[in-house]
Image (cartoon, coloured by chain):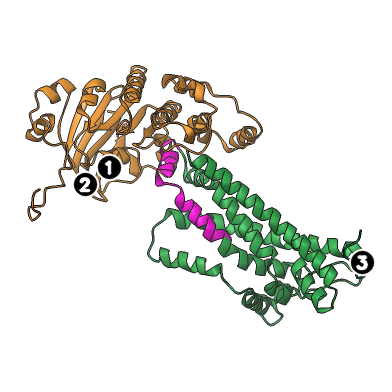
Chain colours: A orange, B green
């Protein structure tokens, strides 16, 4: 297992994870499926080393991320990248957005030189920037300001930006929840192709159909607990857990925490 | 056609020029130092949540309205021979004027920088982090995203400094050398002297120069703001 969560608990705002254990195998697309507000984002943010868990361990190749020094943790962080629900692009040309991760990995002397170069002219595009943009079909938009893109294009650029650093693992937090079907299809295709090239993808989604389309392995999460894991065919067609079954049957699409208020008159 | 018959004191136009130079030197240095202090503080306050954050922000905002004569008085007390910083012998020097303008400009630069740093969404910082950025990288990304606001902050601080008269009159002493070269006389303090001595035309010339400087700075500010809005709107 490359990246593992062992007995992880974390309370973060309203989302709570309880004793979650989950491992990511290299090369696979792991989908974390569950209703909104059940801790999917919290789990991905723990994997991305935003904060330490309240208890339990997040480990990379067996070593606990939070017992590493900051420099060692940075080295591990730089083997991963992440895409959020919102594209979160910088106010800069697309190519500079996509090149960001590559730039921060360079020594300061070279970064300063590139920074000045970027002011006077277009810095040469790193090959991985070009490849990443091509993989989402947006190489022709390299010079455009990222904030002028449509929502779908912006999210595809965000995925290209995550891929350009040549990561071992890409974490994707509901990346298509605001996209139209066409952009969703392009992004799913890019995820599949990245996975074929050996990039591990961890995708959080509440969309079962998407999970069935892209994943090799599914973990169903409910109320902060991983209740069932397995290949998509098994989890969706022959779920063993009661809650997975209800979700698959379409009964648990809303946030489990939002129970109807019994004191309120029903309309 | 000569509209104004300007009577120049000893030193002629070099007098006027030396006043402009002193004004620019003092105000640019003061605002430069304010920026160096304000940006890291704005990032620190903007990024972290701590008890008393709102109070601190309110205090910084209040600082924008500091009466400049009071600042001048306090700075002079600190720098005077009997004051705690008296050993540096800085009273009635350009450095003293830089110090008082620094105190006056800093709340302006800090407050506007802080609000523009706080406008940069959390997800931008998160994106820089997950792409392998260190804490410094994340800070730089935020500065870059807030660049239009920060430039506005610096220009507003400069506007406050260059047009201020009360504190620099107190701590600088409005000194001119016998050859007519300004030592601690700026555009604003020179105008007070010329007005008092009845040389209204010269005062007016200095006033026009000052207005032109402020006008240039303000137009630069609104141009930059409109440019920032243009990109953000889409």
What span is in magenta? Answer: B109-132
Nearer to us: label 1 or label 3 = 3
Residue at 47% from the left image edge and 42% from the top image edge: B134
Given residues B209 and B83, the one toward you in this image is: B209
- Residue B184 % position (x, y): 78, 69
Residue A223 horizontal/vertical position (percent): 16, 42
Instruction: State yes or no: residue B205 in magenta.
Output: no
Q: Chain of mark 2?
A: A
The lab-note entry on whether marks 2 and 1 share a chain reads yes
Disc 1: which residue: A42
Q: Main secondary structure of the magenta part?
A: helix
Question: Hey, which quadrant is residue A66 in on the image?
Answer: top left
- For mark 1, does the 10 Å Cα neighbourhood hold few (<14), some (14 to 19), or many (20 or more) residues? many
In what element is the residue under mark 1?
helix
As drawn, the label of residue B11 is 3
Q: CA distance from mark 1 to mark 3?
A: 72 Å
Report the side of B79 relative to B174 (left or right): left
Above or below, A96 against B205 in this view is above
């Amino acid at each position: 297992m490359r990246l593992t969560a062992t007995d992880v608990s974390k309370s973060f705002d309203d989302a709570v994870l309880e004793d979650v254990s989950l491992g990511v195998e290299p090369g696979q697309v792991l989908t974390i499926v569950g209703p909104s507000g059940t801790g999917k984002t919290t789990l991905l943010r723990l994997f991305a080393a935003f904060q330490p868990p309240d208890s339990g361990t997040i480990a990379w190749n067996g070593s606990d991320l939070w017992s590493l020094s900051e420099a060692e943790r940075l080295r591990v962080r730089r083997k991963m990248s992440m895409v959020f629900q919102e594209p979160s692009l910088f106010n800069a040309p697309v190519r500079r957005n996509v090149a960001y991760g590559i730039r921060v990995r360079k020594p300061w002397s070279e970064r300063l030189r590139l920074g000045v170069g970027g002011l006077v002219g277009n810095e040469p595009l790193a090959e991985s920037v070009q490849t990443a943009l091509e993989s989402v079909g947006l190489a022709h938009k390299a010079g455009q300001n990222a904030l002028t893109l449509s929502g779908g294009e912006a999210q595809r650029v965000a995925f290209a930006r995550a891929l350009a650093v040549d990561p071992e693992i890409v974490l994707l937090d509901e990346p298509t929840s605001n996209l139209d079907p066409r952009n969703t299809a392009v992004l799913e295709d890019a995820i599949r192709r990245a996975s074929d090239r050996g990039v591990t993808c961890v995708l959080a989604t509440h969309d079962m159909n998407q999970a069935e389309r892209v994943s090799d392995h599914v973990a169903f999460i409910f109320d902060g607990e991983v209740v069932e894991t397995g290949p998509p065919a098994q989890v969706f067609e022959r779920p063993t857990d009661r809650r997975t079954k209800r979700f698959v049957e379409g009964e648990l699409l809303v946030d489990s925490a939002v129970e109807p208020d019994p004191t309120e008159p029903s309309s | 056609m000569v509209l104004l018959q300007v009577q120049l004191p000893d030193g002629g136009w070099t007098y006027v020029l030396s006043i402009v130079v002193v004004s620019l030197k003092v105000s640019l240095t003061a605002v430069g130092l304010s920026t160096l202090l304000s940006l890291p503080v704005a990032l620190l306050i903007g990024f972290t949540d701590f008890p008393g954050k709102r109070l601190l922000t309110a205090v910084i905002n209040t600082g924008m309205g500091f009466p400049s004569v009071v600042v001048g008085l306090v700075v002079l007390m600190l720098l005077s021979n009997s004051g705690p910083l008296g050993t540096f012998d800085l009273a009635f020097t350009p450095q003293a004027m830089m110090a008082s303008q620094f105190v006056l400009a800093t709340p302006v630069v800090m407050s506007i920088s802080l609000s523009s740093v706080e406008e940069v969404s959390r997800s931008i910082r998160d994106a820089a982090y997950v792409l392998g950025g260190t804490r410094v990288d994340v800070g730089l990304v935020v500065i870059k995203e807030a660049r239009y606001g920060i430039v506005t902050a610096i220009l507003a601080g400069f506007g406050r400094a260059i047009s201020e008269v009360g504190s620099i009159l107190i701590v600088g002493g409005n000194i001119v050398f016998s050859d007519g070269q300004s030592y601690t006389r700026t555009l604003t303090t020179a105008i007070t002297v010329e007005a008092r001595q009845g040389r209204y035309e010269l005062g007016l010339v200095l006033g026009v120069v000052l207005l032109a400087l402020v006008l240039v700075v303000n137009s630069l500010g609104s141009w930059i703001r409109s440019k920032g809005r243009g990109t953000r709107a889409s």
